[in-house]
Image (spheres, grey):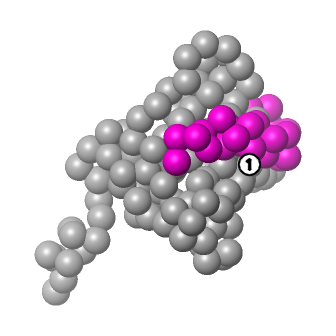
Amino acid sequence: MEERFSELVQLAREAMEAAHAPYSRFHVGAAILTESGEVVTGCNVENASYGLTICAERTAMCRAVVQRASRPVAIAIATRTPTATPPCGACRQFLYEFNPDMIVLAVGTQGATLRTTLRELLPGAFDTEQLDSNRP
Ligand code: THU
């Protein structure tokens, strides 16, 4: 899997170019690597009604679901900021659903890549265990 990481980062950077971010001008690209080796990309999509904005990570994950892609094993996130940008809280929760052990790689334009996992980014996550143990 590791041997695909530089390609994954490159694909996240390419996806970032498609960002629809006229309001924040904060362009984000994401690329998900699946168990079967497929890569699915996404970018942030903003709206004049600001709160409807969808992050790059969730766009990519939704595409992966529609394409019936296999389990996501890693996600690369690219921004034009000098330092790496980690995924927002909503994206952490959203991605956790599909694989808590997913590797998260975040890259900016310079400096170190952030490398972690969803489990590290979202301790005590809400998941199906809570649903199952609290059913009426
Ligand atoms: N954004 C993402 O796409 N992913 C994140 O994890 C953080 C934020 C987008 C949403 C919005 O379009 C812009 O970045 C500024 O918040």
Residue 133 appears left or right of 128? left
Please tell me whether residue 43 is drawn above or below residue 13 in the rendered image: below
Q: Residue at image x 60%, y 18%?
A: 83
Magenta run includes residue 13: yes
Q: Which residue is mark 1?
A: 43
Magenta segment: does it hold 52?
no
- The residue located at (81%, 41%) in the rendering is 14
Give residue 25's quadrant in the image. Answer: top right
Residue 74 picture location, percent across and down: 52, 49
Helix, strand or loop at mark 1: strand
Q: Is residue 51 above or below residue 81?
A: below
Observer-nearest of 32 and 56? 32
- Amino acid type of disc 1? Cys
Residue 46 placement, left or right of 6: right
Residue toward you, 136 or 132:
132
Span highlighted in magenta in the image? 1-26
Residue 70 seen in the current view: yes
- The CB of the residue at mark 1 lies under 8 Å from ligand 1: yes
Residue 18 x, y percent position in the rendering:
85, 46
